[in-house]
Image (spheres, rainbow, N blue to C red):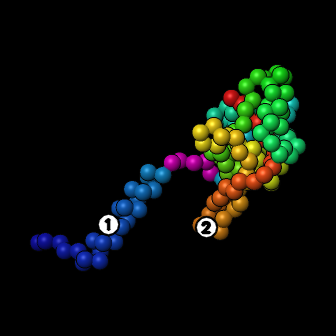
Amino acid sequence: MKIRFPAHGIQAISVLFVVINFCLMLPVSLPAGQAILKYSENGIFQDERNGMMWQVERSNKMKSVQEVENFLKELNSGKYDDWRLPTKEELSDLFTIFDLKNNGDVKIRLEGSYWILGRDSEVQVGSWEIGDGCGPTRAYYTKKAGYLRAVRP
């Protein structure tokens, strides 16, 4: 005896198979609410996933690359000498940690524009605006002035 499946049943099974495989290929992420940021030193918090250290306080608003370079030079004359601008991806990841409420007891100001190191090592300033798409998505828009939240290493 041969078992026959209706054509729509085979299509449904095929779609289910594709969906399951897609879900298995998605990167594993932390569930919302699981703290991954911790205060490590006075004025510094750390991402426990990758060891990156961030300034708790952001700079005053700066309008030029020269101001940014001067700020980093002064910052690097202290305890650590490897503070730098975050990349667009690093700063976006930090924002996402707060979006998902994975920041634990770390409280910082996020609103406004920020200086970043863009593609091809281009220093630029801009901000993310939350889109109206599916889930918390952000689009990056360049601006003329912004804050600096330095990161190391």
How far from the left and from the top, in percent, is residue 67? Answer: 83, 37
User: Residue drawn at (83%, 46%), measured in percent from left and top?
Assistant: 63
* 38 horizontally vs 42: left or right: left
Considering only vertical position in the picture, is 143 above or below 10?
above
How far from the left and from the top, in percent, is residue 30? Answer: 61, 48
How many numbered callouts?
2
Going from N to C along the chain, the mark reached first, 2 or 1, is 1
User: Residue drawn at (29%, 77%), measured in percent from left and top?
Assistant: 8
The quarter of the rendered structure image containing the C terminus is: top right
In terms of secondary structure, what is the magenta stretch mainly?
Answer: loop
Tell me the amino acid under the disc marked 1. Answer: Ser
Residue 69 visible in the snapshot: yes
Tell me the amino acid under the disc marked 2. Answer: Gly
* Residue labelled with disc 2: 133
How far from the left and from the top, in percent, is residue 141? Answer: 69, 56
* Residue labelled with disc 1: 14
Magenta stretch in the rendered image: 27-31
Q: Residue furthest right?
A: 60
